Amino acid sequence: MTMRTPFDKRDPLARRKHRHVPPGARSSALHAMSARAATGRFVLQSCTDCGAATYPPRDACPRCWGSLVWKDQTRGAALLSETVIRTTTDLYFRNHLPWRMGKLALDAGPVAVAHLHADLLIGDRAEMHLVIDKGGNAALFALPAGRNADMQDRQWREFVVPVKDRTVLVSDARSAIGRAIVGALHAAGARLVVAGMAPPARAADLADELLAQDGVQAVPLDLTDPVSIAEGLSKVGGPLDIVINSARFVRSGGVSHGGNLTDQRRAFELSAMGLSRLAQACAPILAARASGAFVDILSANALAPDADFAAYSAVEAARHSLVQSFRHEMRNAGVRVLSILTGPTEDEDHQSIPPPKVTPTRIAKCVLAALEGGLEQSCVGDVATDALTRWMADPALYTREKNL
Amino acid sequence: MRPRVAYDGVVLCAPVTVPYERFSCETAHRWTARALRGLSDATGLKADDFDGFCFASFTAAPDTAVGMVQHLGLSPRWLDHIPTGGASGIMALRRAARAVQSGDADIVACVAADTNHIDSFRHTLAGFSRFSQDAVYPYGFGGPNATFALITDAYMREFGVAREDFGKLCVAQRDNARSNPLALQRSELTLDAYMHARPIADPVHLYDCVMPCAGAEAFIVTTPEIAAKRGLPAASIRATIERHNAFPDEPVQLRGGWAMDIEEMWTMAGIGPNDIDTLQVYDDYPVIVAMQIEDLGFCAKGHVADYIRATSFGIDGDLPLNTNGGQLSAGQAGAAGGFQNVTEGLRQILGQPLGAAVPDARIAAVSGFGLVNYDRGVCTGAAVLEACA
């Protein structure tokens, strides 16, 4: 194992830098905006009566006092005025001064204060993004129109999770999904990709070209065993920035018949309990990092069960619940917890299921996009997107219809 | 709109300024008591004499005017609590004037008082308004400095105003403060020092910002007869205006609510800007001073740079402006900052200035601007006061 760039030795007695988060108090209406921003949508409230868009979030239309609904809006805007804040009483922004923000006229109608990309100048056309700040709340960010997200922009980097030059752990690098993620992270310039290899070790591991690359380190890692996790993390060369939990245990079977209780227990141990073990071990490490993140890849069956995969669905639902609690716990540390929902994948776990299925490569791309876009919740593939859309619209109906 | 009833039978008197302190470990209640004591010392009036009480404060929580009357032993038959900060002085005098005129009250004590503990500014800021909390503070937490930086930036671009122009206003106000023994900042401010001050939120620099402090301001609204009986010099109200959430569709605040109503104010007053002896405007930032000079009709919109360059704002100048130094030099004592314009205007025309007197001052225009709820000041008001013969 070799790393791409040498890591500076730290002073072991140095006082650790506190990671603050931006001010967190928000109205209920803004939390509703954050829930939509979590998936990367750009939404504003629109009036159901007069149609006017409004911002900041309100509880009634300021023009006709009608009801407001969240709607996707056109992203165009123009920068009207700007400032560079050089003093603040807030501890988070004190660590990030100077901070540039400005006021934009949105094509959708309202005016809004937003964080600014360094290249966006007065009078320029802008493209609005609704991002999630380190405290977990929605924030408006204005990029120059026609420009993609720029991982070099100092302010934009506060809202996303850069992968380049970072140390990343993939919890299960034996699976097709895990292997694809290791490859994608390495290609994206991660300093070190730590590939978790569930025991027993195999002779084939030694000849594995993926693991033999510079910047990839294989470590034995068994999520059902806390000692294995502690030992695995202790072998990581340098502090860990990102943890990607790709481990899971997929078996078909029902509840009253066709189910194998040994498989069920194994699934709970690995996917749900394993997530808790991994989270407990890595939370303090991630909390010390400037852009710590934890990504969990889970099945869309977490939203509503597939009766033919009853235990697997139940475990994924438990995992979905645990991840949301973990996200809440990590909010005050500024660590992002991201969920990737996927449908059936093109692998040995889903041999009995007809297409559409998601390829491991596509899941790996989605993981990178979620990190570099700061997306709290992403869907990969049509099945997961369809599931989330139907679940958001009417969870009771979706749960009934899914197994008809 | 119907023509308004003139403010006959109403006067203002007894302007009181409780000396400001940069920080105070005392409460808003204590500062309110000092203001009432100041009114009493100036007039001989006792608690039972005040049958009206109008109150403004940011730091009295959890109390309002209700808690304050019981805390301080008042039994008024007319009570008002005004939450509009920088517009509270104008609004207090408007409300109290109509109460006295209609007979609902005879003697109204109008008081604004705020304390300033270490860290209380940060706390006031953090819970200021829902829109600020949702849509402004998360963007760098620059507080009012950042909000007014956005307004200042747009205003300078739109109207060709230079930092030197704002500097002239700030320097003139500091010169005025030098004769006011109660001003917190009385050392000389040169234009050079203003221009080279450290940036706070571009283009706002250090001397564009007020210094938060503790303090209280008060005045009395009553009838001419009661004032005469007590031997109190008094001033009448020629005209007033008030407006909230004006021009909501304008993307950046380049004008305030005064612009909607100013013609009516001068019509009601029966005079114009040229007849004013002194102008006391709200001055949390010099851009708002410039905006009021335009919107109150002292110069045409968009011509304030030329006007500032051609006008002197000293106590003996062409337009004596914020003659106590304004909040920029005297300090901003929370809601009392919205009363300072009224008390200072009143003092000058009653011949009771804290420092140097504006020569032969009889008529003052006073103007308030309050409450940045989101991206602009929402509340505006103005009044024309004239010393009684």
Image (cartoon, coloured by chain):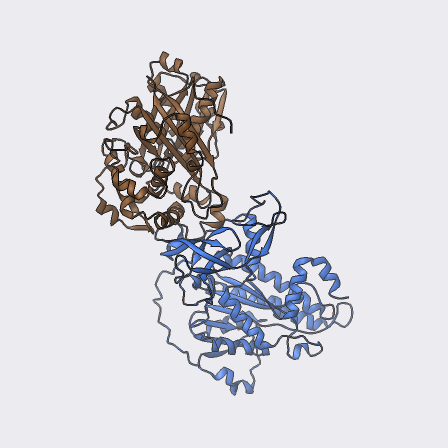
Please identify the quarter of the rendering in which residue B236 is found: top left
The percent coordinates of residue B123 (x first, y second) are: 42, 43
Nearer to us in this view, A268 or B334: B334
B261 in relation to A55, above or below: above
B375 in relation to A141, above or below: above
Please identify the quarter of the rendering in which residue B54 is found: top left
The percent coordinates of residue A345 (x first, y second) are: 64, 75
Residue at position x 26%, y 49% in the image: B197
Residue at position x 51%, y 26% in the image: B2
The percent coordinates of residue B245 (x first, y second) are: 48, 39
Q: Is residue A197 visible?
A: no
Question: On the picture, is A244 further left or further right than B372?
Answer: right
The percent coordinates of residue B262 (x first, y second) are: 41, 33
Nearer to us in this view, A65 or A358: A65
Specify the chain shown as brown.
B
Question: On the picture, is A7 further left or further right than B77?
Answer: left
Nearer to us in this view, A18 or A111: A111
Q: Is residue A77 visible?
A: yes
Q: How many numbered marks have been drawn onto this rendered protein structure?
A: 0
Specify the chain shown as blue.
A
The C terminus of chain B lies in quadrant:
top left
Nearer to us in this view, B334 or A53: A53
A291 in relation to B107, above or below: below
